[in-house]
C-alpha cells in the first residue's frame, strides 16, 4: 500500500460507508472524493451496463465528463484485463499500476482503469503519483457490487431517473441521426462540384457515406444493447432470482412464460418488473398456508403486464406495508397497481408498467421542474392518495420530514392542497 493510502485506512472505511449510502446519481462523486487522497485525478468515470438509463456515471473536470462517449469507454474496456484477486502473500506489497493512455472526451489522456467482476469499468484520468492497484481494485469491486445491488432493488428514484434518461437518450439519438443526415447531404454536394472529376467525386462520396452509415449503425446498435432487454431473457433472470425460494422450502412458484417474440423491455422496466415480483412473492409468503404462487408476464406492445396470484388466506391489501413499497416503484414508472383479495381463496396483484417514457415536455419540464428527487417522490405518493405515515414508511423517513417536503412541494408547484397537487401532476404527464 502506498504511503498516502496507508495514512487513511479508517477514512477509507468511512468513505465506503458514504458510498454505500449514496444514490446511483451521486455515487461517482462520492467515490471520487474517497479516492482523491489515494490518487489525485482530474475525472472519475464509471461505465456499467447494469444501469440502462445512465450507463455512464461521472465526476470531475466538466471538459472530460461532458465529452466522454460510450464508444471510448468500450475501447478502454476491451484492453482492460479483468482484475485478478490476490492474497496478502502474492505479488508486490505496493502492486503499483502504471498509467496508460486512451482517447477520452476526444483527446489522448493518461488513464488507469479497472474492470470489476460485474463487468463494470472504472477509469481515472490524469492520475498523479503511484497508483495502488490492489487497494483501488478492491474498493472498486465493492462499489461495483453496490451499484448492481441498487439496480436490482429498483429504488423509485433510480427508476424515475432511468425513465428520464431514456427520453434524453432518444433525443440524443435523434440529434445524431439528423447530424449524419446533414453530413451525408453535404457529401452528396461534392458530386456537383466542378473542381473534381465525376469518378473522383463518386469515390469520395461513397467512402465517406459508407463510413458515416457504419458509425451511425454502431452507435444505435450499442445504445439499443444498453437500453433494452429481450422479454424472454428478462423473465429467465426473474426465475433465477426466485429459485432460492423454492430451494429453501418456500411455496411452489409457477411461471407463465411471456411470448418469445414480445417487444424488448426498456432496462428500467425489466429491473422494476423483477423487483416487483420478488417483493410481492416475499410479501405473499409472509402469510400462512401459502402453497403455490403463480407469476405471469405478458406484453401488449405498449405495457408490461404482470400478474401474481397465490392460494393463501387472501389477507393482502393495498395498505399492507410491503405492497405500499411496491407501489412506489410502480408510481415511479407511471404504472398502475391493483390488489384483489378473497378471504380463504387467495390474493392477486395486477401491475401495468408502460414501456415508453412520456415525452420530455410532459415530465419535470412542467410545474414540478423545481422539485428535488426526494420532493418528487413525496409529491407522487401524496398525489396518489398516500397519507403521511404511508409515505414515511415507503421512503424510510419520519412523518415530520414528510410534512416538511409536502409544504415545499405545494409551494414550488403553486397549489394549496393535495387535490390540486394531484391535478397539477396529472396535467403534466
Image (spheres, rainbow, N blue to C red):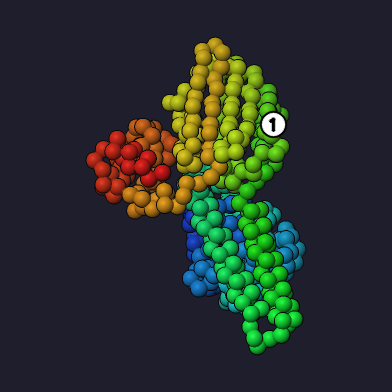
Residue 254 shows in this picture: yes
**Where on the picture, by quarter, is residue 4?**
bottom right
Residue assigned mark 1: 257
Instruction: Please tell me which residue is depicted at 41% across the width and 44% down the height of the picture.
Output: 429
Q: Residue 366, position in %: x, y?
A: 36, 50
Above or below for 227 versus 197:
above
Q: Measuring 72% from the left and 65% from the top, which residue is drawn there?
A: 78
Question: Residue at the spot x=75%, y=66% of the render?
Answer: 91
- Pick the quarter of the image with the N terminus: bottom right
View extreme (top): residue: 344
Residue 216 is situated, as x and y percent measured from the top left of the image, at: 65, 64
Residue 277 falls left or right of residue 100: left
186 or 271: nearer the viewer: 186
Q: Residue furthest bottom?
A: 195
**Residue 153 in view here:** no
Up/down of 353 relative to 317, above or below: below
Q: How many marks?
A: 1
Residue nearest the viewer, comparing 301 with 325: 301
SS label for mark 1: loop
Circle 1 crowding by C-alpha within 10 Å: few under 14, some 14–19, many from 20 = some
Residue 209: x and y in percent read 68, 71
Residue at 64 percent across and 74 percent down: it is: 188
Q: Front-most of 321 and 63?
A: 63
Q: In front here: 105 or 291?
A: 105
Quarter of the figure with residue 56: bottom right
Percent x, y for residue 254? 68, 25
Question: In the figure, 201 relative to 315: above or below?
Answer: below
Amino acid at each position: 500500500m502506498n504511503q498516502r493510502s496507508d495514512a487513511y485506512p479508517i477514512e477509507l472505511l468511512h468513505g465506503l460507508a458514504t458510498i454505500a449510502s449514496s444514490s446511483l446519481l451521486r455515487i461517482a462523486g462520492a467515490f471520487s472524493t474517497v479516492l482523491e487522497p489515494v490518487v489525485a485525478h482530474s475525472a472519475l468515470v464509471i461505465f456499467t451496463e447494469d444501469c440502462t438509463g445512465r450507463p455512464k456515471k461521472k465526476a470531475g473536470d466538466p471538459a472530460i465528463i461532458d465529452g466522454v462517449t460510450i464508444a471510448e469507454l468500450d475501447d478502454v474496456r476491451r484492453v482492460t484485463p479483468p482484475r485478478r484477486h490476490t492474497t496478502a502473500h502474492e505479488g508486490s506489497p505496493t502492486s503499483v499500476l502504471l498509467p496508460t493512455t486512451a482517447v477520452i472526451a476526444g483527446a489522448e489522456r493518461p488513464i488507469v482503469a479497472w474492470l470489476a467482476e460485474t463487468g463494470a469499468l472504472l477509469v481515472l484520468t490524469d492520475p498523479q503519483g503511484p497508483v495502488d492497484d490492489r487497494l483501488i481494485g478492491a474498493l472498486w469491486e465493492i462499489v461495483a457490487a453496490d451499484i448492481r445491488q441498487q439496480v436490482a432493488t429498483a429504488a423509485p428514484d433510480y427508476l424515475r431517473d432511468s425513465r428520464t434518461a431514456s427520453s434524453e437518450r432518444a433525443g440524443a439519438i435523434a440529434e445524431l441521426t439528423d447530424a449524419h443526415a446533414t453530413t451525408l447531404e453535404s457529401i452528396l454536394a461534392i458530386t456537383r462540384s466542378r473542381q473534381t472529376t465525376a469518378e473522383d467525386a463518386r469515390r469520395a462520396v461513397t467512402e465517406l457515406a459508407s463510413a458515416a452509415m457504419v458509425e451511425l449503425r454502431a452507435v444505435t446498435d450499442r445504445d439499443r444493447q444498453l437500453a433494452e432487454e429481450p422479454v424472454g431473457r428478462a423473465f429467465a433472470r426473474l426465475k433465477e432470482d426466485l429459485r432460492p425460494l423454492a430451494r429453501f422450502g418456500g411455496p411452489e412458484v409457477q411461471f407463465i412464460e411471456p411470448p418469445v417474440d414480445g417487444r424488448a423491455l426498456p432496462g428500467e422496466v425489466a429491473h422494476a418488473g423483477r423487483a416487483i415480483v420478488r417483493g410481492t412473492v416475499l410479501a405473499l409468503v409472509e402469510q400462512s398456508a401459502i402453497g403455490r404462487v403463480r407469476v405471469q408476464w405478458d406484453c401488449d406492445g405498449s405495457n408490461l403486464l404482470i400478474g401474481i396470484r397465490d392460494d393463501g388466506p387472501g389477507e393482502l391489501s393495498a395498505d399492507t406495508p410491503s405492497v405500499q413499497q411496491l407501489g412506489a416503484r410502480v408510481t415511479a414508472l407511471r404504472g398502475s397497481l391493483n390488489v384483489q383479495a378473497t378471504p380463504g381463496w387467495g390474493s392477486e396483484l395486477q401491475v401495468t408498467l408502460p414501456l415508453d417514457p412520456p415525452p420530455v415536455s410532459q415530465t419535470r419540464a412542467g410545474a414540478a421542474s423545481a422539485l428535488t428527487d426526494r420532493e418528487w417522490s413525496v409529491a407522487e405518493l401524496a398525489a396518489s392518495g398516500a397519507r403521511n405515515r404511508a409515505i414515511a414508511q415507503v421512503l424510510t423517513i419520519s412523518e415530520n420530514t414528510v410534512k416538511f417536503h409536502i409544504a415545499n412541494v405545494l409551494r414550488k408547484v403553486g397549489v394549496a392542497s393535495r387535490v390540486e397537487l394531484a391535478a397539477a401532476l396529472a396535467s403534466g404527464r
